Image (cartoon, helix red, strand yellow):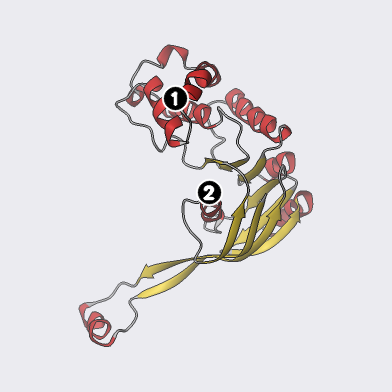
Amino acid sequence: MIIAQNLTKIYKLAKQKTFKEFLPALFFGKKTTDKFYALKEINFEIKKGESLGILGKNGSGKSTLLKLIAGVTKPSDGKITIDGKIAPLIELGAGFHPELTGKENVYLNASILGMKKKEVDRLYPEIVNFCELENFMDQPIKHYSSGMYMRLAFAVAVAKKPDVLLVDEILAVGDIRFQEKCLNRIKEFQNQGTTLVLVTHSPSLIKDYCQKVLILDSGNQIFFGDAEKGVEKYLKNI
């Protein structure tokens, strides 16, 4: 379950000032920053096992919202409530070290994701099988292609069923066949009761994988409700 209540995120942007403009700010406390609303009073609720798609143009606040749900950043105002353990597929491989081997990075990244060593020992063969890099696990990942790197990172991230799965435009992993494999794993999680939040520029993915959709525009909530109706509204207005 995820509930957002008047969720707002404000960033302070520094103004570019000349020395002449800086003096009044220094002596008289004149503001040197502007407020930027990345998100403004967002409200939605999805129940356990439901799936939410988030649509919007670049800069609409999609990734900011996902980071708030993941707990990467805190809201400036409002409240976000999440029930269950979250697996964020936001920045795949963020904890990878280029000098370490694929195998060493599996254990490193899994520990960052909260897995115990015994658990990783048990899941390791499945991770290797999923990413299809059996012949490269003892090589430093600095020698991996970008596709190999992302496949390994995705395999670690989806090794274990989460309560809530957050996916941010990371499905361009490898070739078409491997993308299908990733989508099938996500569908498996859905069938097992995982709550899914999917950020994408693909309305068709929203229709295929989500029951509800949230449409954002410049940080404002434009629509929240049935996925099919929301996608139709989005396509009419882009």
Q: Residue at x 43, y 11 (%)?
A: 135
Residue farthest to the top, as pictured: 135
* Image quarter of the C terminus: bottom right
Left/right of residue 18 with respect to residue 238 in the rendered view: left
The residue labelled by disc 1 is 117
Quick one: 143 or 111, which is closer to the camera?
111
Residue 218 on image: x %, y %: 56, 64
Quadrant in the picture for residue 178? top right
Quadrant in the picture for residue 110? top left
Question: What amino acid type is highlighted by mark number 1?
Answer: Lys
Residue 90, above or below 26? above
Residue 89 on image: x %, y %: 53, 39
Left/right of residue 46 with respect to residue 60 in the rendered view: right
Question: What amino acid type is highlighted by mark number 2?
Answer: Ala
The residue labelled by disc 2 is 70
Residue 236, above or below 177? below
Label 2 CA crowd tier, 10 Å (few <14, some 14–19, many 20+)? many
Left/right of residue 29 with respect to residue 117 in the rendered view: left
Q: Residue at x 51, y 15 (%)?
A: 125
Of marks 1 and 2, the one in the foreground: 1
Q: Secondary structure at mark 1?
A: helix
Quick one: 133 or 60, which is closer to the camera?
133
